């Protein structure tokens, strides 16, 4: 039976969704919309009586604020158009899934597979001047993403006459399962075509390696009835396993690196092993808290005698560029599965997010055809991560945005998750797991659909006009939450031996990797639970449908495992058995459709060979105007996109759930100044905690990625110190996002970009080692270029360096805001003429050359002493300046306290010959601004002896940032109210 | 009975997520908490009757789809109503926090004016500003309220984090009845004056008459949008570094008092 349930806002109640749509339609699309009323529609194709449909409607309708009807109400007089937004066939409809649960409760029986429920939203639009084309723009340009949603535009008159059409996006493409073979005995050009047209992202060399493998396997394959040519499934598995996304071929490449300054050349065999892993291994000799690094889904470090900490950050750039909401949501719920699948499975604790976008104020004509406007993209990305994070009940602790026009082509979306692992689970070390032959291969969570096919391979390419639309997945945080709750119960009862997540590459990736650990796997794909019929076997195996984990379950536990899953409403399916046959073996209804040698699958890809050539760029030096208005400059910097407050968006994220937050993302008397770092407890009502911090400085890459890297690491470390942390128990995560560094016709400057990559890695090795900050996990995304609209846009080389530190006593944490007037203001650390790549130079339209550098010995001495001071609770406030230098730093300290600061710039420890503007706006690393009680002056200065520092002024009651260059030589006097307005207004409400 | 014999049930599952801190709150208040998946009650493995108090916790049950609390409340109504009704008629305590508040209003456990249990009388609608919001707000308690949870409380800072928290009574008559019977136990307050706040951000969602929390006429069933379980530690407060400097850092987080009141009441009366 078909029933249409229609739920509207009750007469006299407000309709925030409608009002919001009107606002956006006017602001973004400039449409002459007068008013919009909205209603939710549920289309039921369910066997039930009309009274039962009415009962369902009553249960769905909130009688205080809504009214509902089974059937349809005609559009009210004055309505010109009706726009309906529903999902395309096969796309996950999370609302409908919940509706099914409620309907089953009401009917007292589960819904059958052939009973359908769909959700949609209808917009009843008023506006006499609106045309049908306007409505299509409203649909496609604002309310729906054509990739995943269907919009129907109907004239209100037509609806009054004929009624609304049924919303029934059923999947009708029921092609019978078929396994094709692909002949590789073809000319090279044909091999390349097969790769390109199949979105396999395999190079000719790789295709030839595969060709060679199948030649060598011919007799063995014929003997078991397999064709000599690879099946589609086999080729897809190889493409996925060997994709840049999964294999990190560029980091694993052999690179000829030439430095034209020194004239020296060297060969680097594998950047990851030579620099990142090597520094961690060396540090591992010196610290005793590394538990599990690099080989699992996330890094693990010790926290205390009961718990380990688990941390991982990912990027989700390519899917986000196509579907910002779905891509970003999958980014956050996807990275949640990394700690979930680390060791025996971690409890999730905190999220972090960070985005690089083009300016939300970019003129529409500057956005290449086919790309989202950065403002819409940003709105949708935030919404995706907010919904994913909030619905999972995981607070965010760090969130940031960075803007540069070069992120217009491909936005960067970083998502990370911290988790905890009990040190022992069922008496065994929690970070260790194994698979034994005979263990069952089990998949849990969501069902498999066509969503996310080719995600791993397409994200290993640039974004082009033919990028596959089905590569995008839609997240369902609630399904994942339910699965996550279940797996912790199963973990604590010892019901499985091994767990890992299904991310990029789906089952191909998870079972493929698990086979590598055990020695093989037999998998029967016909047993896989599908969202709808019609998937081909290869699609089932590489689909990136979300919310799934893969397990190895010991045979004696399978019954208990499946029973618990059933009681928790989690779908769990046995898909095969792990073996030690040496082969990944897949069948369809018992017939072999893939048999790949495990060593070839994991180690058969030929090593990439790259050339890198470093020639430092030279930029013109800007002339700083003689009459520069320092006060105005401070305000302009506070208002600039990379300094200003993002509080409006941030407050839409929950950062208090779990009740652990101590130093929050926003601090100060009015809780409105972005904190340097955040501090949290790990368990309720305890005093041990963690500090999360990040560093990112893409603009420094324009001058030298070596110093971009050291500055980013230093930024994260000194921010950790600034909230009361100390050296000794800090671990790092490196997330590299690069433009394509492979020289070729489309990338004529590949050798330079590759050299930039080498230098960043050299810097990481050197400084992590010096700081004793081991990288415990990381990720790279190497093809962040776009050619859409006929214009190539490449991102600047970008590294996010994230740190996690143990804090012994959270009660000693410090915030950046001035607390008391009369306190003394100190600047700690040396200011140098390092303005290259600074926000100040950017204001002047320049890059410059004197990029901030890090002097590890000086920095370490500073951090040790500053930690002593916070340990003795001497700092009433502590802040570390980043973009905008001390000028912005002083302002944040004063704005946070809603107090004034009187500072003599001449007293700031600085290199000889710097002008006041240079001292104030240099972005030299490793510096702090502290305020202390006057009575502690002597004690504080004794502690700091031996490093550059100076008392430069006082905290005042008069709410002004008063800067002078020696007695009676005022530089500026900025009212704190005005400074705060500058800081908060740029992105307020945006 | 002893406080540690007071058994508190925290129901979880289906996207709820505040079980750990809510259990910690009951424990810190002296009771013995237990967290159970809703299915363990629905399939009869465990009984509501084993407990003295029950918490409907915060989170996103069923993703807030079809309106926050709707699907979860529906499940309870269709599959556990008799047991819940007996629990309430026995005079045992119920608290609904955030998503739990939304759930118990949908169920009609609060305010149950006129003794009409399971009749929805008030709603928590989408925030006036249209977006989810996380912030710390100040609450003013009603000293005349029969609510057992808010006894002795005057001003209480707590975090809020919700997208659907705008309190709307069914009609004016009902609102007047709520106020006349002092069933409004918590209002959003202006930190400058301590008086009810009618404007954003102090009234963070546009709630009618600044209403943040209500109880039933017995005072034993209590629902509120803010999160007392997220202010158990004094170091949760956004201004704790300043409070420490000024020597006014409290010994416990102030949210704990609501739980302590309930546990004390249960120990003395149940």
Image (tube, coloured by chain):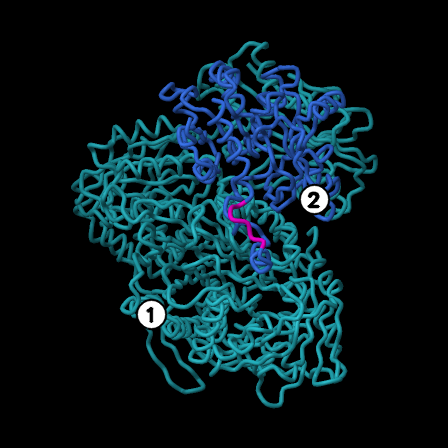
Give the label, 1 or 2, closer to the camera.
Answer: 2
The answer to whether any part of residue A293 appears in the image is: yes
SS category of the residue bearing label 2: loop
Q: Where residue A409 sits: x, y (%)?
A: 58, 59
The cyan-tinted chain is A
The picture places residue B93, in percent across and down from the top left corner, at: 51, 25
The spot of residue A912 in percent (x, y) is 59, 90
Residue A93 visible in image: no
**Chain of the residue on which disc 2 is drawn:** B
Relative side of A144 to A214, left or right: right
In the picture of the structure, the residue carrying the numbered disc 1 is: A279
Q: Which residues are magenta?
A: B248-253
A716 on left or right of A176: right
Mark 1: secondary structure: helix
> Which class describes the residues within 10 Å of circle 2: few (<14), some (14-19), or many (20+)?
many
The chain under label 1 reads A
The residue that disc 2 covers is B202
- Circle 1 crowding by C-alpha within 10 Å: few under 14, some 14–19, many from 20: many
- Residue nearest the viewer, comparing A128 with A853: A853
**Residue that lies at the very extreme toward the bottom in this rendered image:** A913
Residue occupying the point 31% across, 64% down: A607
Does residue A160 sit above or below A151 in this rendering?
above
Q: Nearer the viewer, residue B200 or A777?
A: B200
Q: Taking A781 as reference, is A23 left or right?
A: right
Q: Is residue B231 magenta?
A: no
Hue of chain B? blue
Q: CA distance from mark 1 to mark 2?
A: 50 Å
Q: Position of residue A488 (x, y in %)?
A: 35, 39
């Amino acid at each position: 039976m078909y029933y249409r349930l229609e739920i509207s806002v009750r007469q006299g109640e407000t309709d925030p969704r409608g009002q919001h749509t009107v606002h956006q339609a006017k602001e973004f699309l400039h449409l002459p919309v007068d008013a919009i009323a909205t209603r939710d529609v549920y289309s039921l194709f369910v066997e039930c009586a009309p009274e039962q449909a009415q009962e369902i409607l009553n249960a769905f309708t909130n009688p205080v604020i809504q009214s509902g009807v089974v059937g349809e109400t005609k559009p009210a007089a004055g309505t010109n158009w009706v726009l309906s937004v529903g999902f395309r066939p096969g796309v996950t409809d999370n609302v409908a899934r919940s509706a099914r649960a409620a309907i089953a409760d009401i009917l007292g029986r589960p819904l059958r597979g052939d009973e359908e429920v769909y959700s949609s939203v209808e917009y009843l639009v008023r506006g006499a001047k609106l045309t049908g084309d306007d409505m299509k723009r409203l649909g496609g340009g604002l309310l729906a993403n054509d990739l995943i949603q269907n919009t129907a535009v109907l004239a209100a008159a037509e609806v009054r006459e004929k009624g609304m059409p049924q919303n029934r996006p059923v999947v009708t493409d029921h092609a019978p399962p078929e396994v094709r073979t692909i002949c590789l005995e073809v000319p090279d050009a044909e091999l390349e075509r097969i790769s390109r047209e199949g979105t396999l992202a395999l190079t000719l060399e790789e295709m030839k390696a595969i060709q060679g493998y199948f030649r060598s396997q011919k007799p063995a394959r014929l003997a078991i009835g397999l064709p000599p040519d690879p099946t589609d499934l086999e080729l897809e598995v190889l493409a996925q396993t060997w994709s840049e996304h999964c294999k990190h071929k560029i980091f694993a490449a052999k690179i000829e690196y030439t430095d034209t300054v020194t004239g020296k050349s060297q060969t680097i065999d594998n950047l990851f092993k030579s620099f990142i892993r090597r520094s961690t291994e060396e540090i591992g000799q010196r610290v005793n808290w590394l538990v599990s690094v690099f080989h699992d889904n996330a890094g693990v470090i010790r926290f205390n005698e009961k718990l380990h900490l688990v941390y991982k950050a990912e990027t989700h750039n390519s899917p986000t560029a196509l579907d910002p909401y779905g891509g970003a949501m999958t980014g956050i719920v996807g990275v949640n599965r990394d700690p979930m699948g680390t060791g025996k499975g971690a409890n999730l604790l905190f999220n972090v997010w960070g985005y690089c976008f083009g300016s939300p104020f970019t003129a529409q004509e500057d956005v290449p055809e086919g790309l989202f406007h950065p403002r819409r993209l940003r709105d949708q990305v935030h919404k995706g991560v907010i919904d994913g994070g909030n619905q999972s009940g995981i607070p965010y602790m760090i969130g940031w945005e960075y803007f540069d026009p070069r992120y217009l082509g491909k936005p960067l979306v970083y998502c990370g998750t911290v988790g905890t692992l009990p040190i022992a689970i069922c008496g065994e070390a929690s970070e260790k797991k194994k698979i034994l032959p005979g263990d069952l291969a089990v998949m849990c969570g969501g069902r498999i659909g066509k969503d996310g096919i080719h995600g791993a391979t397409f994200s290993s390419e640039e974004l082009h006009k033919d990028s596959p639309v089905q590569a995008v997945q839609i997240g369902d945080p609630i399904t994942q939450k339910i699965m996550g709750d279940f797996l912790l119960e199963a973990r604590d009862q010892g019901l499985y031996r091994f767990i890992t997540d299904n991310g990029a590459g789906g089952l191909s990736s998870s079972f493929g990797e698990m086979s590598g650990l055990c020695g093989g796997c037999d998998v029967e794909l016909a047993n896989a639970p599908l969202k709808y019929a019609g998937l081909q076997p290869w699609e089932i195996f590489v689909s990136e449908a979300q919310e799934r984990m893969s397990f190895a379950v010991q045979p004696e536990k399978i019954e208990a495992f499946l029973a618990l899953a059933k009681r928790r409403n989690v779908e769990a399916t046995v898909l095969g058995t792990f073996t030690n046959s040496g082969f990944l073996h897949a069948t369809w209804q018992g017939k072999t459709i893939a048999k790949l040698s495990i060593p070839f699958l994991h180690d058969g890809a030929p090593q990439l060979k790259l050339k890198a050539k470093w020639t430092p760029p030279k930029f013109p030096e800007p002339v700083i105007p003689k009459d520069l208005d320092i006060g105005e400059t401070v305000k302009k910097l506070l208002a600039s996109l990379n300094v200003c407050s993002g509080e409006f968006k941030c407050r839409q994220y929950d950062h208090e759930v779990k009740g652990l937050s101590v130093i929050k993302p926003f601090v100060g008397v009015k809780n409105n100044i972005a904190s340097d770092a955040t501090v949290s407890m790990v368990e309720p009502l305890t005093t041990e905690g963690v500090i999360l911090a990040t560093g990112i400085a893409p603009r420094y890459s324009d001058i030298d990625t070596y110093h971009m890297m050291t500055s980013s690491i230093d930024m994260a470390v000194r921010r950790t110190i600034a909230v009361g942390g100390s050296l000794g128990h800090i671990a790092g995560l490196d997330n590299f996002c690069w433009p394509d560094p492979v020289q070729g016709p489309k990338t004529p400057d590949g050798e330079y970009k590759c050299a930039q990559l080498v230098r960043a890695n050299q810097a990481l090795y050197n400084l992590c080692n010096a700081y004793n900050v081991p990288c415990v996990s990381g990720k790279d995304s190497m093809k962040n270029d776009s050619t859409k609209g006929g214009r190539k846009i490449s991102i600047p080389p970008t590294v996010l360096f994230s740190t996690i530190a143990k804090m012994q006593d959270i009660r000693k944490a410090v915030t950046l805001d001035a607390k008391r007037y009369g306190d003394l203001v100190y600047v700690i650390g040396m200011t140098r003429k390092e303005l290259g790549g600074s926000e100040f130079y950017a204001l002047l339209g320049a890059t410059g050359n004197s990029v901030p550098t890090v002097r590890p010995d000086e920095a370490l001495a500073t951090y040790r002493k500053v930690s002593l001071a916070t340990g003795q609770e001497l700092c009433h406030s502590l802040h570390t300046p980043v973009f905008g230098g001390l000028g912005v730093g002083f302002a944040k300290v004063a704005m946070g306290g809603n107090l004034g600061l009187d500072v003599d710039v001449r007293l700031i420890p600085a290199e000889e010959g710097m002008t006041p503007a240079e001292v104030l706006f240099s972005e030299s690393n490793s510096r702090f601004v502290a305020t202390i009680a006057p009575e502690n002056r002597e004690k504080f200065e004794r502690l700091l002896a031996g490093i550059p520092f100076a008392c430069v002024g006082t905290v005042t009651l008069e709410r002004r940032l008063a800067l002078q260059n020696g007695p009676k030589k005022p530089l500026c006097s900025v009212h704190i109210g005005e400074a705060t307005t500058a800081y908060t207004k740029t992105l307020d409400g945006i | 009975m002893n406080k540690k014999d007071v058994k508190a049930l925290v129901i979880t599952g289906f996207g709820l997520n505040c079980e750990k801190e809510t259990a910690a709150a009951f424990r810190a208040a002296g009771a013995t908490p237990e967290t159970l998946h809703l299915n363990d009650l629905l399939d009869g493995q465990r009984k509501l009757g084993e407990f003295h108090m029950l918490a409907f916790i915060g989170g996103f049950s069923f993703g807030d789809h079809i309106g926050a609390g709707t699907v979860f409340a529906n499940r309870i109504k269709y599959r556990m109503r008799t047991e819940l009704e007996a629990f309430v008629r026995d005079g045992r305590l119920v608290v609904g926090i955030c998503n739990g508040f939304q759930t118990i209003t949908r169920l009609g456990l609060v305010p149950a004016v006129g003794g009409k249990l399971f009749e929805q009388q008030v709603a928590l609608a989408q925030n006036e500003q249209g977006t989810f919001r996380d912030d710390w707000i100040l609450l003013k308690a009603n000293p005349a309220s029969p609510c057992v949870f808010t006894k002795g409380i005057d001003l209480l800072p707590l975090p809020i984090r919700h997208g659907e928290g705008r309190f709307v009574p069914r009609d004016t008559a009902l609102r007047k009845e709520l106020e006349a019977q002092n069933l409004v136990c918590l209002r959003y307050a202006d930190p400058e004056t301590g008086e009810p706040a009618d404007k954003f951000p102090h009234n963070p969602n546009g709630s009618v008459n600044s209403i943040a929390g209500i109880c039933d006429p017995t005072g034993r069933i209590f629902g509120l949008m803010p999160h007392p379980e997220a202010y158990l530690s004094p170091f949760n407060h956004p201004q704790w570094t300043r409070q420490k400097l000024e020597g006014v850092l409290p010994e416990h987080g102030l949210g704990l008092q609501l739980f302590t009141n309930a546990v004390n009441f249960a120990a003395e009366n149940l």
